[in-house]
Image (tube, rainbow, N blue to C red):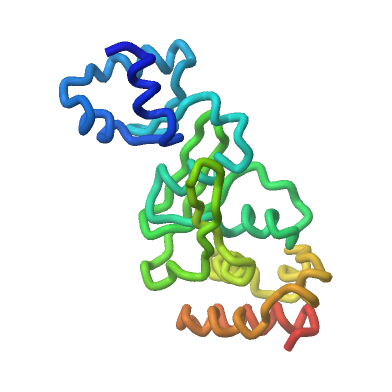
Amino acid sequence: MNYLQFRNRFYELGCFPVHQVYAWQPAFDKSNLTRWVKTDLLLKLRNGWYAFPEYLKQPDFAYYVSNRIYRPSYISLHTALAFYGMIPEAVIRISAVGTLKKATFENAFGTFVYQKIVSGLMFGYDVKPLPGGRTLLFAQPEKALLDLLYLYPFYNTPQEMEELRLDEDFMQQDLKVEQFGEYAGRFQSKALSKRVKLLLKVHGLY
């Protein structure tokens, strides 16, 4: 099998695990992948995961990579907050949460950081469409903010809340306060509830 045959079979997938290659060709020689990576015909995303370099030019494909290479997970935390314009910082790393252990991966698409939550907290995300018929799991603004307060408990004073530098226009006009409170209750965490009330007080919403 040559590279062109391989590319024709897997290009439309965007990124793919090696087990899909073996499902297609059980006798596939894995050294082909190593050679194609060395010659820049393929990109290695993490052990057992690959993509084609042309996808580096596709907007938001890095988000899709995040979803795919460590599942189940969804984009959240600082990445989602920056996407919605809730924080002013440009976020370099892609942050996600999921039910697997904490992990970090680096590849040509960026740095991918995953935080662990229990399966009962895998809610509050939307399925967003991407080109090519792909979909992306992306936290709603309220859930992204709650994930942050839950996973980073040092945000527990008015000063710390202010240092988040949450966009005041968003907080006053776009934050769904009722949904924010409903989602917070599903965490069943008294400590988180206190932080949520403090945050809302700081922004005059409680």
Task: Name the side, left or right, on which 29 lies relative to 50.
Answer: left
Picture coordinates of residue 36 (x, y %)?
40, 15
Q: Quick one: 29 or 183, which is closer to the camera?
A: 29
Viewer can see residue 206: yes
Looking at the image, residue 57 lies above or below residue 61 = above
Which residue is located at x 63 percent, y 80 percent?
A: 196
Task: Name the side, left or right, on which 4 lies relative to 184.
Answer: left
Which residue is located at x 38 percent, y 67 percent?
A: 118
Which residue is located at x 62 percent, y 53 percent?
A: 79
Viewer can see residue 154: no
Looking at the image, residue 23 lies above or below residue 185 = above
Q: Quick one: 21 or 163, which is closer to the camera?
A: 21
Q: Quadrant of residue 81?
A: bottom right
Picture coordinates of residue 146 (x, y %)?
58, 71
Q: Quadrant of residue 176?
A: bottom right
Picture coordinates of residue 49 (x, y %)?
37, 33
Task: Name the side, left or right, on which 97 lies relative to 172.
Answer: left
Which quadrant: the C terminus?
A: bottom right
Which residue is located at x 57 percent, y 83 percent?
A: 193
Q: Residue furthest right?
A: 169
